[in-house]
Every structure is written in C-alpha cells, then in structure tokens.
Image (tube, coloured by chain):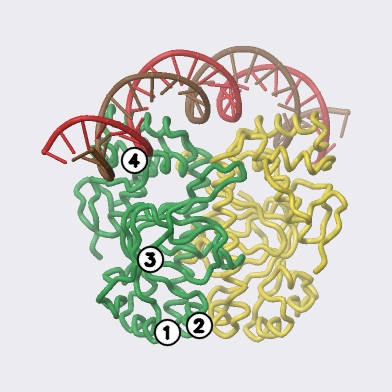
Chain colours: A green, B yellow, C brown, D red
Amino acid sequence: MRSAKIIPLAGHEDMCSECGLTAQCLSKDPADSDELHAFEIPATPRVLRRGEHLFRTGQPFESIIVLRSGAVKTYMISLGGKEQVVGFHLPGDLLGIDSVESGEHMCNAVALDTCSFCTLPFDKLMRLCARSRTIQYRLFSRVSRTILHGENMLLTLGQKSAEQRVAAFLLRLLRRQAERGYSTTEINLPMARADLASYLALAVETASRVLTRLQEAGVLSVRRSQVQILDIEALGQAAEERIDDLLRSDHQRQVR
Amino acid sequence: MRSAKIIPLAGHEDMCSECGLTAQCLSKDPADSDELHAFEIPATPRVLRRGEHLFRTGQPFESIIVLRSGAVKTYMISLGGKEQVVGFHLPGDLLGIDSVESGEHMCNAVALDTCSFCTLPFDKLMRLCARSRTIQYRLFSRVSRTILHGENMLLTLGQKSAEQRVAAFLLRLLRRQAERGYSTTEINLPMARADLASYLALAVETASRVLTRLQEAGVLSVRRSQVQILDIEALGQAAEERIDDLLRSDHQRQVR
DNA sequence: CGGGAACTTGAGCTCTGTCAAAGCTGGTGG
DNA sequence: CCACCAGCTTTGACAGAGCTCAAGTTCCCG
C-alpha cells in the first residue's frame, strides 16, 4: 500500500475567496466565505497524486472533504475481498458524509489523478451550520442530492441493460461537466475500465464491449480514456434517458 | 389511483413524550422532546391504510416524515413507466430527505400496511437544528446512515448473486427487527414478492425460486409473507455476510 | 363460494460473466 | 533515446445465472 503524502498547497492563505468553486461549494454568498474563514474553515488545501488515498476504511472520521480539482473514486471491499466502486467525485463534491454516524470512514477514497481538496472539520462545520442558515441549507441540499443520486443508481441497476448503463453513465458525466462549464462533447475518463465496470455492476469485458459497440454505431469514438461524443441524441436513446438543454447539440448554455 | 386520506390520530396531543420511539427518533434526551414541542414539532400524527400514499413524485416537499408504525415503500417510475422500489421503511425511519434540494418529492411513498407517522416541517426542523446540537447531530447521523446504506446496496447489487441478495435482505430485516426489539426468528414480509424483487434488481420469479430453494435447504420456511428463520448461521452463509451478536442463535441482547 | 390477484413452477432463451489470449501503451531503466 | 515490460484494454469463445413467457396453484376478499 502506498502511503498518502499530503502536500500543503503553498502560497494560498485565503483559498475560499479565490476558489472559483464557490458556486459548487457550500455557499454562493461571498459574505459566507468570511464566515467560513472566521471558523478557520477551510484548513490549508492539500494535494494528492494519482493512486494516493484521501482516507481509508476504519480511519477516524473528523472532516468533510471538499474536492477542488481532480477526480476521486470511493470504494468498499466486500467480505470476499473484492473491490466495489461506490462513487466517482468531481470538483465541488463532498466526501465523507456517509461516516458521520459511525465516526470512522466506511469506505476508501483514492485520487484518480492529481487532485486538491479542502478539509472541513465536521464539528466546526456543525457549529457553522448553527450560525448560518445559508450554509446549513446548502449542506442539506448537497446531502439530499447524494441520497437522490443513490436512488437513481438503484433505478439504473434495476432496470437498465449493460449498454443503457454505460450510456447513462456517460450522459451523467457530460451533464456534470456541463454544470462546471467543461466540454459537452468530449470526456476524459479519469477511471480505469475496471472501475467504471464495477460502479455499473458489470464485468470489465462487458463495459469494454459496450463502448466498442457504441463506437461502431457511430454514437461516440473511444480511444482509451478519450471519449468523443459524436451523436448525443443517439447516446440519450441508448441510455433511454431524456437529454436536457444543458447537453443539446448546439451546446448553448441556458441563461436566465 | 387511490387518494390518500390522511386521518389525524385522535386523543394524542403530546405524542413525542409518549412515542416510545425516542431512541429511534431525533433525540434520546427527554429535554429535547420539549424543544421539539416548543417548535410545534411534530404536527399531529397521521394514519394511513395499506395502499395509500404518503406523498408522490412532484408534490412540493415541505416536511420530513418520521414513520411511527407500519411499513412504507418508496419507489420511482422510470421513463419506460416501470416501477422501481428504492427503499423499505420501518418505524423510526425518516422519509423525504432526498427532496430537499429540488423542493419537490422525487419519489413516491406508499403504505404497505396501516401506518402512522409524524410530519416535521423542514424549515422548523432547520431552525431547531440551529438551536439544538444534539438534534442537529442526530439528524446528520441519520442522513449519514441513509447514504451508507445506499453504498451497501451498490455493493450488494454489484457483487452478490440472486440467492445472496435475498439472504442479505432477510438478514437486514432481521437486524432491523432486532434493533427494535422484535423477533429475530420470524419475519412478516410487509411487501409483495414483486416489490422485494424490484428492490433487489431481480425478476419476481427469481426471488420466488430463491425463497423456495432456501426453504428446501432447510434455512427457512416460507408461507406467503410469513418467514420462519430455521438456521440463521446458514442464512448468513447464503448471504456471504457475517451475522452479528444481535442475531446469534441464543437471541440474547447485548447489554452494555 | 367464486373470481382475481399474488405466488409458484416449468421450459427455453439470452444477456452477461468467465476464461483465455492477444494488442496497446506509458513508464522505466539501460 | 530506445526497448522492454507490466498493467490495462480489447476481442473471442463458451457457459450459465437469471429473465421471459406461459401455465398452474394458492390465497384473500367480497
């Protein structure tokens, strides 16, 4: 096991205000950023490289983690010793909320590429919540979204075929990228096929074959981790999902 | 669609203090019960009969629901119009937290038998959280447990066979009954086979066959919704799960 | 007591998993 | 700078767990 050397990010004392993630993080309101600061939140941002762990099962849970850049996968080890991926996380995502009750981490989190993150000590966060309604509400919103996403995963695993699952997965990635202002035609899969497959409850070979099939059908073009979406409508059909305006072919962002 | 007639439970003005669920609900501390009261929480408990809905997809989300008795299933309808069960809920469980972000219910909740529940207006609950650290913490604990359970479901669906899933499901039910002080040898399945199967991402026929097979193996005895556990160790093996002391054959409760 | 819903059982088929092998690729060391 | 190697990915062949369709059986409720 590689040990996780956590590197403090130099030269950034006041990250929250210059984070660029404020819309993704706990509060949109700059005023709240001061509150975060007053509560000594966040601690100095850290950086990890690919393969290093943010935390492991059994370690004491003390802080919620806010991912600032990079990608992280969370996974559990079954009694049989096999790995099961339970989530992929992008900048702005919160990690660790599943461990509040037990007080120790219930899964493992590993960097899929170089990533940086803030740690919000949970007790401080709780105190802050009691003071700031905005932040309290944002936090519950996030948690609510997490639970909802889990329910949607159940629906996916319960009703969709291998092809539909992979297509739906790609759509979700695209949507998340769109929300963050990234490309809606190109995906750089940060995870290995095995991870993708595990997450979707498929065999690696099946996941691979599905991607090949989607490529042969002209829906997309894959080369290792590079995925070009050629026909988003077709991808939507393959997933049996509606594709929202965020992803429509003209790629116009809805402005309100 | 049957309309949900919500019947106020007569003759109970101060339910929280006589709820008997305090250990399951938001606070163990009787003092906090006063706080709940001071915030006009809960509203008058309600009763629903089998088949009636607590809420439906798209209805405005205003209150968290605490189930007091009976059993409830939550489900979503996929684009194809098929029903997907996403949860079964027992007394003490919280319903609706997945809908905070969107402001409207994202799934349906229906009573599997006669059940009673309290509604906690979410805004009042938020204000209460800001005042009582105990309740705030308990609420986050619950939410954390919910997320963790979702992750465990992913693990189950990703790695377990039909037989293992059914066995694991029964074990979980037993464990929940044990926590609530009910039998650890007998289960009265409140849901139809179809619901059970949907939840475990199986066909009805498969679920049925698995139960038959477990019966033939002498692990349990099924008759419609009545399940007698004959060999809990064998059930644990069938589920590939460790069985905790709560369920050990002597049925002694661990006292600390 | 009868009808319908829920459940079980059976037979056949298909999707996906498993096993095996070959192809790529990026990183490392000579 | 190039060659090699380990790990990741793809492809192929095959088998089997679980799904589908269909027909019984049981049970509940009116």
The amino acid type of the residue labelled 4 equals Gly
**Residue that label 4 marks:** A236
Please identify the quarter of the rendering in which residue B129 is found. bottom right
Looking at the picture, does residue C12 appear above or below residue B129?
above
**Residue that label 1 marks:** A39
Disc with the residue nearer the chain's start (4 vs 2): 2
Disc with the residue nearer the chain's start (4 vs 3): 3
Q: Nearer the viewer, mark 3 or mark 2?
A: 3
Instruction: Please say whether residue B223 is visible from this viewpoint.
Output: no
The amino acid type of the residue labelled 2 equals Arg
| Marks 1/2: CA–CA distance | 9 Å
Residue A144 place in picture, x, y as percent: 49, 63
The residue shown at (28%, 28%) is A217
**Residue that label 3 marks:** A6
For the residues labelled 4 and 1, say whether their Cβ atoms are less than 8 Å apart.
no
Q: Nearer the viewer, mark 4 or mark 1?
A: 1
Q: Nearer the viewer, mark 1 or mark 3?
A: 3
The amino acid type of the residue labelled 1 equals Phe
**Residue that label 2 marks:** A127
Q: Are both tags, 4 and 3, on one chain?
A: yes
Looking at the picture, does residue A167 appear above or below residue A49?
above
Residue A122 place in picture, x, y as percent: 50, 74
Q: Nearer the viewer, residue B225 or D1?
A: D1
Q: Nearer the viewer, mark 1 or mark 2?
A: 1
